[in-house]
Image (spheres, helix red, strand yellow):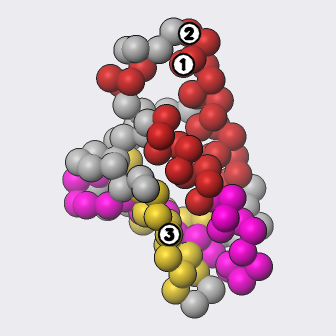
Amino acid sequence: MLVTYEQKEFVYLLTIANPPLNVLTDALLSDLDVMVDEIIAKLDCRALVVTGAGEKAFVAGADINQFLHLDATEGARLVEKGKKIFDKLAFAPFPVVCAINGLALGGD
C-alpha cells in the first residue's frame, strides 16, 4: 500500500508513502481514493491529518515520468481522478489538515 492510515482516538492520520518524494502516481491515487472513502465512512472520525512518509517531501506533486507515457485522454483521466479525491477531502464532514514535513509541490 502506498497510503495507510491509523486511528488515534477520534483523529485519523493518513500517510502518503511513495519514497523518496511521495509523488502522485496512478497507483497511489487509487490507494488514496480507497483510504479516503474508508475514513469518511467512519462515524467516529472528528478530524483527519494527512502527512507524507519520510523527511524529504510531504508530496512532490505528480509523477512527471508517468505523464510522459500517457496520451492526452489518459492524462486527463488521471488529473480528473486526483481532482475527485481532493474534492472528497475538501468537502469531508470533518476538518482535514496537512502536516507538511518537507517539499509540498503541485498545482490546480
Disc 3 packing (10 Å; few <14; some 14–19; many ≥20): some
Q: Is residue 103 visible?
A: no
**In the image, what residue occupies the spot 74% across and 56% down?**
91
Category of crowding for the residue at label 2, using alpha-carbon neighbours closer than 10 angstroms: few (below 14), some (14–19), many (at least 20): few
Magenta span: 36-57
Query: Which of the pair 40/101 is nearer the observer?
Result: 40
The secondary element bearing badge 3 is classed as strand
Could you give the CA–CA distance between mark 3 and mark 1, rounded to whole angstroms?
28 Å
> Real-space Cα distance between discs 2 and 1?
5 Å
Of the numbered discs 3 and 2, the one sitting upstream in the chain is 3
Is residue 71 left or right of 55 when viewed as pictured? right
Figure quadrant of the C terminus? top right
3 or 1: tag closer to the N-terminus: 3
Q: Is 43 colored magenta in this rendering?
A: yes
Give yes or no for contact between labels 2 and 1 (Cβ–Cβ under 8 Å). Answer: yes
Q: Is residue 24 above or below residue 63?
A: below
User: How many labels sit on residues?
Assistant: 3
User: Does residue 30 show up?
Assistant: yes
User: At x 54% / y 81%, what residue is drawn?
Assistant: 7
Give the farthest residue toward the bottom: 9
Quadrant of the image for the N terminus?
Answer: bottom left
Residue 55 percent across, percent down from the top left: 23, 60
Q: Amino acid at mark 2?
A: Ala
Residue 11 image offset from top left, x and y in percent: 58, 81
Q: Secondary structure at mark 2?
A: helix
Give the camera-side residue of 29 and 59: 29
Q: What's the mark number on residue 5?
A: 3
Specify the amino acid type for callout 1.
Answer: Gly
- Asked if marks 3 and 2 touch (Cβ < 8 Å), the reply is no
Circle 2 sits on which residue? 72
Q: Nearer the viewer, residue 95 or 6?
A: 6
